[in-house]
Amino acid sequence: MSGDLKELKNMMNAVTPRPDAARRAENIALAQKNFETLQGSHKDARPTSNRPMTGLWTGAKIMLNTLTSRAGLTASTALIAIGLIAFTQIGDNLLNPGGINEADYGSIPASKQVPKPEAAGPILAERTDTTKREVREEQSLSITPSLDLTEADSESLSDGATFQTESGGVASLNSLPAPVPSSPVELTRSRVQTEGYVVGGLVADEAPQLELPNTEEFANADTNPVHIVTEEPVSTFSIDVDTASYAVIRNSLTNGYLPNTDAIRIEEMVNYFPYDYPTPDADAAFRPTVSITQTPWNPDTRLVQIGIQGAVPDATDRPPLNLVFLIDTSGSMNNPDKLPLLKQSFRLMLGQLRPEDQIAIVTYAGSAGQVLAPTPAGERATILAALDNLGAGGSTAGQAGLQQAYATAAAMAEDGDVNRVILATDGDFNVGLSDPEALKNYIADKRETGTYLSVLGFGRGNLDDATMQALAQNGNGQAAYIDTLSEAQKVLVDQLGGALFPIANDVKIQVEFNPAQVAEYRLIGYETRALRREDFNNDKVDAGDIGVGHQVTALYEVTPVGSPAQLSDPLRYGTSDTATDSNDELGFLRLRYKAPGAATSQLIEAPISTDTAQADAGFATAIAGFGQLLRGSPYLGDWSYADAIALANSTKGNDPFGYRAEAVQLMRLAASLSQN
């Protein structure tokens, strides 16, 4: 077989033509001539941007057209690259990837430059919590054009990292301005990664945002002190049915931090919960109840609990209701827990109204306007459409909104109707009449028209509780804070009657303690509701109102005469004479109130006996102790959160909606957070 293959190979070689060098040279010459002919033009040359046919770029083009070998193309490409680097701005940026020159920003002193991080560890940026109301509009920032960061270093710079400014302030990394691009190429580089933004020499996915300061402000006062009965035997205060403080405390704790001390008003915590008080007689507006128990945090003192239960008349007898929803639609309301939650809350409330009740909607943001004329509550679709169309934007013209709302309520008023403005806001009144005292005087003048004002607070961060309290207290209304739809259900559905229909106005409480029985006393809470002794009988002095079914609870801690818990020493030259005829009386309770629309008050009096007891007093005591723990009260000794939890669990009683069980969980959260 090998011989046959060899013979076949020889035959193939014999028939294959031999290479003809002359013929090959002739063919190559013809091909070159045809190529040059086709590349040229038989007509006159057309004008182009490269005329005249001179210059670096034109020469390069001719060279590319002439050179066809791989070696020639490689040489020409290398020559062009060298020219770009040596003679153009593109080359400058290629050699300087940061794209930032010191000349673009001016000379930066060495003392102002951010030091290069050491290789031993990443940069740790100090965090700061902004809690002040002041917003520094202008700060001179010390910015280093570039940061030499390792990958680990850049990851350690979180979104909340801050740097110290030349003026001594603190600026967030997210708030540093982007460097000015030094060239169009640098501008293009700053738009990389889906239109990212250069922030402090780094690329961010979003535009820099200034961190908004926490501008919350709460109405409160110093904790009530201990009073000596022989010197100040009488205590006078206005009742309070607001519950905003408890809801704010709950919101803080469930978000992982202890509440601001000024946000803790113990009376609003205690009054958040229902108690088993006896109902009033048929013709009475309310009924007072007094009980005396041992103080859990001090066995040598006693707690006097005063409870008031409002009457609950037949719902079919209630008068027609005219409501004006005054809704804050300013830019600060543009959060899920503000305007959207507000709309959902009013939807719940709308289902509780009668078809003949009237609804109007006034909004304010920069300027005020009526978005819904008075409309029967039965026209639900019309009212809901007006609510759904509301959007947030602009500044807050609270004064204009109040004026428009009161004017609308006046136009809706008819004899026998109940007129009420419901203000829903985050409390950020930053345009117009924003001073709480000025608002207080304005509302005080308007309440004489017979229109009540209630305030619903939404959201956190700029909640102006001080303004809300001033409005509600002087508008004969109630203040509540709504942070969840469940809270809206409680305030605007379960307790709607108490929130909208008053049964007693200007309710005041006065207690005179018997110096033969009591050496000292202190009122737990009600710091912002204190009245002078002479205000009790003065019907011109405004006080709190009670609505249908409302309850009010007040607690005094009293020190019996001769108790080792007495904090004050007896006077050397004083006397202990008493004017009472009955030594079994701990004190004497007086209440004043006005019927709705009346100008003259009525008086209720009752002695406080030493043997009075109330079965449902324990849970109110646990909540009062909880509030004092949050405020850091000096009167609790070594009583702890664990003691408050144990007392609350043992006295929880009937809890159909789980409010008391929720309070125990908040106590547990506070106990844990207080350890950090």
Image (cartoon, grey):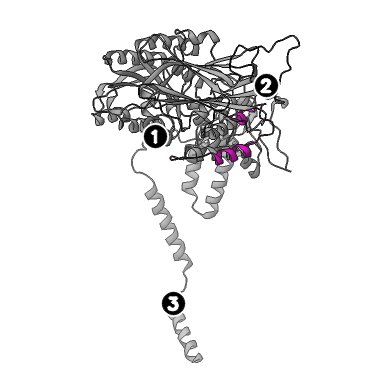
The reply, left or right, for residue 369 in relation to residue 30 is: left
Q: Is residue 662 above or below residue 598?
A: below
Q: Please report contact status of discs 3 and 2: CB closer than 8 Å, yes or no.
A: no
Does label 1 or label 2 sit earlier along the sequence?
A: 1
Q: Is residue 309 visible?
A: yes
* Residue 302 locus on image (x, y percent): 62, 27
Instruction: Determine crowd level at label 2: few under 14, some 14-19, many 20+ residues with C-alpha closer than 10 A.
Output: some
Which mark is in front, 1 or 3?
1
* Residue 359 locus on image (x, y percent): 29, 23
Residue in the picture at 36% in, 19% down: 421
- Does the magenta-highlighted stretch encompass residue 647? yes
Give, as a three-letter code, the residue at label 3.
Thr
Give, as a three-letter code, the residue at label 1.
Gln
Disc 1 designates what residue?
A: 489
Give, as a three-letter code, the residue at label 2.
Val
- Does the magenta-highlighted stretch encompass residue 175? no
Does label 3 or label 2 sit earlier along the sequence?
A: 3
Disc 3 designates what residue?
A: 16
Does label 1 or label 3 sit earlier along the sequence?
A: 3
Q: Please report contact status of discs 1 and 2: CB closer than 8 Å, yes or no.
A: no
Q: Which residues are magenta?
A: 627-656
415 or 378, nearer to the observer: 415
Q: Which mark is drawn over residue 561?
A: 2
The reply, left or right, for residue 371 in relation to residue 619 is: left
Q: Is residue 395 visible?
A: no
Find the distance from the CA under tag 3 to the CA under tag 2: 137 Å
